[in-house]
Each structure stands twice: as C-alpha cells, then as structure tokens.
C-alpha cells in the first residue's frame, strides 16, 4: 500500500516527472509550446508559485510552492492529465504518457536552492 503523502503550505517542493520510457517528446517545439500552454492554464486555475522549470527531452522538473499544501497533488495531477490528453489528441495516439507518479521532495527555501537537473543523453 502506498504511503500517504502530506504537504505543508508555503513550503517549496521539487517535482520531477518523466515521460514513459524516457521518450524524447519535448524535442519537438510544438510539444514544448503545448506544455507551456497547459502550465499557464494550471497557474490560472490554482494558487501556486513556480520556479526553476527545466523541460528536458523526456522529463520535467520544477520547484513549486502552493498557498494550500493540500492542493499540491491536485495541481500536479491536473497538469499531467491535461497535458497527456492534449498531447495524445494532437499526436493521434492513445495510452499512458507519464511514467508513474511524480517524485516530490521538500527543498529548503529560497527557490534558488532548487537544483537544476543535468540533461540526460
């Protein structure tokens, strides 16, 4: 059984999530633009701060601070589900896009301490 994750308000977390099989979908500029659009919609929908966004070939990493810590899982879920649905529709494909749950870890503030993820080849 999964361990229940609890999140605190106004604390910075580093979130990392990977595309299934580390497929390099973000090499396509249209896909990167689509992700940016979904991210902007997410920002309009939820109350959070985002810093240090790194979009790699098949991975996304960023630091996030939610005004309401309990909403953090909802924010990440909405972002991933919405992007996956739109990506699949645009690419005329079906099935899973993301490889499991997002990895979330507490980082000390300020956001400048959120590490940059080195690019994988």
Image (cartoon, rainbow, N blue to C red):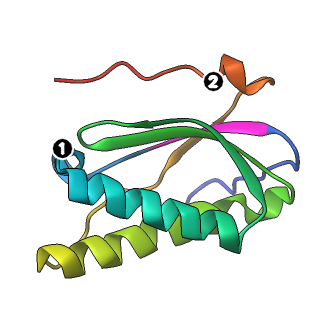
Q: What residue sits 41% from the left and 43% below the top?
A: 60
Q: What is the quadrant of residue 41 in the picture?
A: bottom right
Q: Quadrant of residue 117?
A: top left
Asked if residue 83 is positioned above or below residue 65 in the image, the reply reads: below
**Gap between marks 2 and 1, in whole Å?**
24 Å
In the rendered structure, which segment of residues is drawn in magenta? 12-16
Q: Identify the residue at horizontal 54%, vertical 71% (top origin).
A: 78
Q: Residue 73: x, y in percent?
A: 65, 62
Q: Residue furthest left?
A: 92
Residue 64 can be seen, yes or no: yes
Residue 118 sits above or below residue 6 on the image: above
Is residue 95 visible in this depiction of the protein? no
Would you name the residue on which mark 2 appears?
A: 114
Q: Mark 1 highlights which residue?
A: 27
Residue 3, placed above or below residue 121: below
Determine the residue positioned at 69% across, 20% down: 112
Between 63 and 105, the residue placed more toward the observer is: 63
Q: Residues within 10 Å of mark 2 (few under 14, many from 20)?
A: many
Name the residue: 82% across, 56% down. 69
Looking at the image, tell me whether mark 2 or mark 1 is earlier in sequence order: 1
SS at badge 2: loop
């Amino acid at each position: 059984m999964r361990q229940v994750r609890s999140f605190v308000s106004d604390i910075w977390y580093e979130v990392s999530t990977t595309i299934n099989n580390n497929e390099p979908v973000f090499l396509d500029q249209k896909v990167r633009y689509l992700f940016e659009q979904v991210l902007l919609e997410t920002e309009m929908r939820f109350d959070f701060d985002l810093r240090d966004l790194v979009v790699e070939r098949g991975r996304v990493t960023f630091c996030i601070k939610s005004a309401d810590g309990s909403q953090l899982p909802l924010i990440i879920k909405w972002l991933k589900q919405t992007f996956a649905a739109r990506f699949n529709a645009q690419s005329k494909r079906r099935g899973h896009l993301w490889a499991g749950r997002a990895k979330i870890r507490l980082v000390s503030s300020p956001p400048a301490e959120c590490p940059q993820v080195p690019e994988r080849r």
